[in-house]
Image (tube, rainbow, N blue to C red):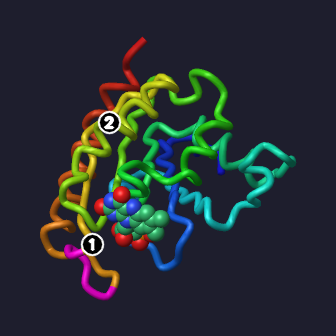
């Protein structure tokens, strides 16, 4: 999962404990768009990583590799359902394992799904400070409600948001990578 010689890396982190997952689908779509624009991509599905290691009770090479991949990425995507008006505990556990400054200078994008429209600000009060606490650069992402999905597939409107986000992420990551 290391960054190629010429291609920048985008890493998606899926924080839903459930499968299939709407939020994970958004991460897959965003990574697909970035791959089409020349990025190397990797998706970390936290639901299949060992729980003991995620809770820092055991060692796991898989978890270590996942944390290392996030540290090598130029773009870090966190996809999560809304749980109790915030991101999931699974996602928090993984981010808690990252060393201080691990996301320094990286473009960080939140993709959040939820049943409640009222929780659309959750990425702003949840994911944004989560990224910033690790010195990442938070970028406006997507909050999509469950009624935007039919049989797990996102609506045309959500697909358009993802497509716009691909362009924004690439533009901002170019600027971020030239920062001292
Ligand atoms: C334990 C739990 C808590 C939830 N809490 C909220 C919530 O506070 N607000 C909300 O809008 N949706 C909430 N939901 C609904 C999920 O966020 C929503 O169905 C989401 O799209 C699921 O994403 P996934 O398919 O990626 O797992 C909750 C679901 C579960 C299982």
- Label 2 sits on a secondary structure element that is helix
Residue that protrudes farthest toward the left in the picture: 157
Instruction: Point out which mark residue 125 bears.
Output: 2
Is 19 on the left or on the right of 152, as rendered? right
Q: Is residue 27 visible?
A: no
CB contact under 8 Å: marks 1 and 2: no
Residue under the point 23% across and 43% down = 168
Residue under the point 51% across and 59% down = 14
Residue under the point 25% across and 55% down = 143
Q: Quadrant of residue 25?
A: bottom left
> Which part of the image, by quadrant, shows the C terminus?
top left
Is 126 on the left or on the right of 142, as rendered? right
Query: On the image, numbered disc 1 is attached to which residue?
Result: 146
Most foreground residue, 36 or 16: 16
Residue that protrudes farthest toward the top in the picture: 180
Q: Quadrant of residue 118?
A: bottom left
- Label 1 sits on a secondary structure element that is helix
Q: Is residue 67 magenta?
A: no
Most foreground residue, 174 or 47: 47
Q: Which residues are magenta?
A: 147-151
Q: Is residue 169 visible?
A: yes
Is 44 on the left or on the right of 86, as rendered? right
Q: Quadrant of residue 102?
A: top right
Say if disc 1 is inside 8 Å of ligand 1.
yes
């Amino acid at each position: 999962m290391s960054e190629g010689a010429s291609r920048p890396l985008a890493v998606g982190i899926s924080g839903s404990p459930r499968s299939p997952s709407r939020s994970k689908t958004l991460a897959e779509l965003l990574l697909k768009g970035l791959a089409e624009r020349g990025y190397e991509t990797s998706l970390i599905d936290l639901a299949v990583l060992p729980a003991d290691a995620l809770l820092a009770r055991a060692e796991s090479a898989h978890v270590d590799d996942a944390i290392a991949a996030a540290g090598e990425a130029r773009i870090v995507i966190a996809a999560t359902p809304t749980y109790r008006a915030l991101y999931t505990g699974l996602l928090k556990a993984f981010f808690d394992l990252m060393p201080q400054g691990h996301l320094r200078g990286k473009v960080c994008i939140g993709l959040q799904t939820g049943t409640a429209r009222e929780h659309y600000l959750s990425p702003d009060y949840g994911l944004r400070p989560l990224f910033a606490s690790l010195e990442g650069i938070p970028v406006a992402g997507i909050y999509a409600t469950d009624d935007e999905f039919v049989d797990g597939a996102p609506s045309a409107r959500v697909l358009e948001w993802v497509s716009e986000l691909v362009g924004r992420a690439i533009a901002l990551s170019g600027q971020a990578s030239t920062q001292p």
